[in-house]
Image (spheres, rainbow, N blue to C red):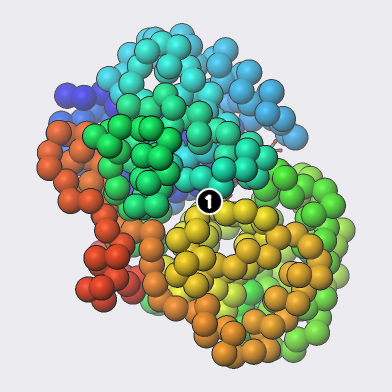
Amino acid sequence: MKKILLCASTRPEMIKMAPLYLELKNRSYFDPLLFSTGQHKEMLYQVCEAFHIKPDFDLEIMKERQDLFDITGSILSKAKELLKAIHPDIVLVHGDTTSSLALALACFYLQIPVGHVEAGLRTYNIYSPFPEEFNRQAVDIVSQYSFAPTELSRDNLLREGKKAETIYVTGNTVIDAMRHTVRSNYTHSELDWVGSNRLIFITAHRRENLGIPMHHMFRAIRRVLEEHDDVKAVYPIHLNPVVREAAEEELEGCEKIHLIEPIGVFDCHNFESRSYLCLTDSGGIQEECPSYGVPVLVMRDTTERPEGIDAGTLRLVGTDEKTIYETFTKLLENKEEYEKMSKSINPYGDGHACERIADILEGKEYQAWDSKYLACKGVVNFPMDVPNII
Ligand code: UD1
Ligand code: UDP
């Protein structure tokens, strides 16, 4: 039996690692253990509850207004003895958080093999997103297995000199999660409040957007909402107090928007799928919305997910108030512009990424995810109401 340690320490990591953990647990070849640094607390356990899982280990490092030194330093000092005691055959880390970086580094120091799930995403701007672009590049350097979600992420790794035989194109595991969350008969009181108005879904949290950029983003959003009668917005605010202060300052008192607590992953995916438009600086939402054909205005200067831009569903609008205001307004008022973006093309996966990763780790043959092939076959629409595995 292969002892695999799966690390998931923040909300998006847990959403994307939970289906993989469940897949490995279903196979007798593996002895999977779930590990969290505790970089997130409430937001992490909200996901665990939804998937009915619980970390076997939690370093519980989170503190309010933590900085990057807090996160990296406390993980490195706490993980060493635990990793030595667990002695896993392989450690799987995800994406680009500072937890993933610190754990990959700890494994490198202890010479434990690392597999990187969601490898090869790049902006090639080390400060955007910050610190994620550095984190993922560094994790890719120390990984023995690179599970690239798309052909484009594989090509990035090849260009950087990673050996072809260590890279596997699997699709993104977030699509696996979505197959089990989106339901056609879903209801929620916030959706009742929106009624027949157009739903605008908003999230924001990026470190490089904290401060002035975030205030500009919110001001633009408020102006547009107040100028349009038939739109209502729902914004589940991240628990970061800096984000909450900015959101409350700029958006409180606006009757067109509901500021709510972070919602569970089932709610979030169902809200997104029913949205007219999404405004976000999130990474994961850029992968989810294209699957439903919901246009996304990405409030960032760069994206590591250009597949969605090519597919037409994502548009980079940066954090300038005027640009966000104008683009958001145009998409509400110009049907043709909107329809250009609203296409059901899903470049990020077919919902079978976890099976592929498990097959690879088991040494079995695997069929790479090929978005172009499936798109030609017409397999582009999102499968709703797949029998629930959870
Ligand atoms: C982190 C990741 C980012 C990822 C994001 C997903 C880093 C540096 N950043 O950013 O890549 O996109 O998670 O959401 O790895 N907090 C709580 N409870 C929680 C979670 C957060 O109270 O469950 C508050 C705490 O005050 C914490 C603050 O939010 O100090 C910021 O959390 P942190 O993980 O440092 O940053 P994120 O913006 O969440
Ligand atoms: N999400 C959620 N509840 C919320 C907001 C987001 O479950 O209130 C989900 C969302 O569907 C996506 C993930 O969290 O799967 C994105 O997380 P986040 O934006 O925090 O991080 P990022 O993807 O930017 O790393």
Instruction: Look at the picture and state if 178 lies above or below 384.
Output: above
On the image, the x and y values in percent for residue 336 come to 57, 90
Residue at image position (45%, 70%) is 311
The residue drawn where x is 53% and y is 24% is: 102
In the figure, is residue 120 to the left or right of 37? Answer: left
Give the vertical position of 218 relative to 9 (above or below).
below
Furthest residue in direction left, as rendered:
365
Q: In the displayed structure, does residue 42 sit left or right of residue 30?
A: right
Badge 1 local density, few (<14 within 10 Å), some, or many (20+)?
some
Q: Could you tell me which quadrant the N terminus lies in?
A: top left
Instruction: Pinpoint residue 196: horizontal percent, then vertical percent.
Output: 59, 88
Residue denoted by label 1: 304
**Residue depicted at x 34% and y 58%:** 349
Name which quarter of the figure residue 348 lies in. bottom left
Q: In the rendered view, tell whether residue 98 sits above or below residue 354.
A: above
Give ligand 1's quarter of the image: top right
Q: Is residue 241 left or right of residue 200?
A: right
Q: Amino acid at mark 1?
A: Glu
257, 369: nearer the viewer: 369
Quarter of the image where one finds residue 20: top left
